[in-house]
Amino acid sequence: MYNDKTLVCKECGEEFIFSAGEQEFYAEKGFQNEPTRCKACRGKRDHSAKKELYDAVCAECGQPTRVPFKPHLDKPVFCSKCYSSKKI
Ligand SMILES: [Zn+2]
Ligand SMILES: [Zn+2]
C-alpha cells in the first residue's frame, strides 16, 4: 500500500504531494525515481521542452549555446547560427 508523500520540488522549492495513486502509477510503469518537480513545474516543462538542454560553447564563434545532447570534448559543438552556415 502507498501513502501520500510530501516531496520538495527541485525547480521551485515548493512542497508537493506525491499521492498514493501516483506512486502506484509510477510503480506500475516501473519508474525508479520519484518525481523531482511539482505538477506546475512538470506542466511547464512539457510545453516548453521535452528534451533536456545542455550548456555548451560554440567551437566556431565561442558563444554560449544550448544543445539537446551532452556535449563531448572530442566533438565540437556549434551554435545554431554556425551550424547552419556550415551546412552539415
Ligand atoms: Zn515546482
Ligand atoms: Zn557559433
Image: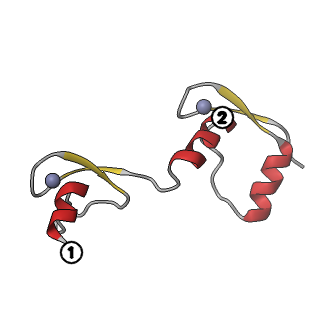
SS label for mark 2: helix
Left or right: residue 49 compared with residue 7: left
Name of the residue lying farthest toward the bottom = 88
Q: Is residue 86 above or below residue 68?
A: below
Residue 28, image quadrant: bottom right
Q: Residue at x 33, y 60 (%)?
A: 70
SS label for mark 1: loop
Please name the amino acid that badge 1 sits on: Ile
- Residue 62 pos. (x, y %): 11, 48
Q: Residue at x 90, y 49 (%)?
A: 1
Residue receiving disc 1: 88
How far apart, in angstroms, are the residues tagged by discs 1 and 2?
38 Å
Q: Residue at x 20, y 55 (%)?
A: 81
Instruction: Report the quarter where the C terminus lies.
Output: bottom left
Left or right: residue 7 compared with residue 75: right
N-term-proximal mark, 1 vs 2: 2
Asked if residue 79 shows in the view, the reply is: no
Is the distance from the Cβ of mark 2 to the nearest ligand 1 atom less than 8 Å?
yes
Residue receiving disc 2: 40
Please name the amino acid that badge 2 sits on: Ala
Name of the residue lying farthest toward the left = 61
- Residue 38 pos. (x, y %): 65, 35
Residue 74, image quadrant: bottom left
In front here: 42 or 72? Answer: 42
In front here: 21 or 5? Answer: 21
In front here: 58 or 84? Answer: 84
